[in-house]
Image: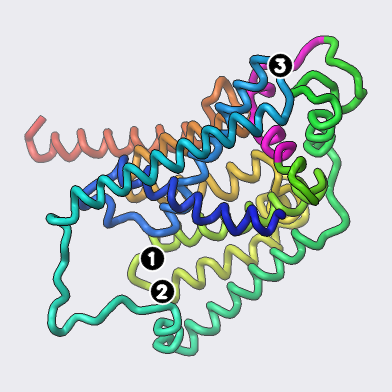
Amino acid sequence: MLALVAIMLFPLLFLLGTCVVRVLHSGKERGELFWEDRLLAGIPVLVGLAEGAHLGALARGQSVLAFQKYFCLLLGGAVLLSGGILFVMRLAGRGSEVKKMQPGENKKRTLRDRIRESGKTERFLMTGVALLFVTQLLLVILRTEIYQDRDLTLETVMSFLSSGRIHEINPVTGFPYEAGLPLRLKILCLPTLYAALSTLPGVTAEGATWHFVPALMLTFSYLAYVSLGRTLFSKERNKRLLFLLVFGVLIFAGDYLFGMEGFGLLHLGFHGTTLRGAVLLPWLFSLCLRKKWKLGVCIAAAEACVVWTLYGLGASAFILGSFLARNLVRRVWNGRKEGTI
């Protein structure tokens, strides 16, 4: 069942993300976005839908099954809306965006063509990246020893499933909360999403939380660094592959201490902090370097739904604000130098 969910998830994310990209960025701006951006842009949408369903079930004191119902309704509506928007945009732009093939212009190359045309160095780097990714993916999926210190994610998921309510039972004691739970912890939607996954046929809470979600997180992390590599080395494929290879090696190098991104990806891929540090932040850096501020705002909003931050303003908001401030100062400085201000 989890394999089926994974197969359905990626085209779903790509559809939602493509709609977001086309709505937020049009014309020449869209040409600076990659296919990885379209897939990753679906993550904030999915998190937003899960947050809406989570808050709806939480406010009414309902169960995980109610969350499932709300989430499926919201997701179905988002898919229909995204498909409709893309269809209308395609019809509207059909007459103006037709590009004729020039006599000497080649058709788009396939992956097989690119592999055939690649040199020995490129093939070596591609093989190294693939081996690192597959090895790490197998470690995450097949690992039997799970780091559980300073973590109550699985216990929280189990409390949702056993009690039939969201954030009413203390996962440590097994009894109702006496002093309550801080609101900033209550509104985080990841444990509820994991609990909903655990109710699928043939799926256990351990399998969904400790193996399936970390495998997705590792994949999304590589995609985020692919996007960052394309931004840093736009015309140098070997450097992009070397960048990915170094990233893969650093995952193993960082697998020694709690708090390191490598440790998070290999042992705590279900944490919201891992999603933020290994997926959202590198992708945000890539977007900020290309001045895609609107998608950056989506990332900052998604972080507030998955990590306990200071009133919703976390690392993504700080980085986005820093880039915007730098851009504004640079624009004012250039304007003064040119005498336009």
Taking the magenta stretch, the answer to whether it contains residue 186 is: yes
Asked if residue 246 lies left or right of residue 209, the reply is: left
| Front-lying residue, 229 or 93 | 93
| Front-lying residue, 44 or 2 | 2
The amino acid at mark 1 is Phe
- Helix, strand or loop status at disc 3: loop
Taking the magenta stretch, the answer to whether it contains residue 312 is: no
Q: Quadrant of the C terminus?
A: top left
Identify the magenta region: 179-196
Residue found at x 86% / y 16%: 176
Q: Position of residue 121 (x, y in %)?
A: 49, 85
Determine which residue is flagged by label 1.
233
The amino acid at mark 3 is Gly
How far apart marks 1 and 2 lie (CA) works out to 7 Å
In this view, the mark in front (1 or 3): 3
**Which is nearer the N-term, disc 1 or disc 3?**
3
Callout 3: 10 Å neighbours few (<14), some, many (20+)?
A: some
How far apart marks 2 and 3 lie (CA) works out to 52 Å
- Helix, strand or loop status at disc 1: loop
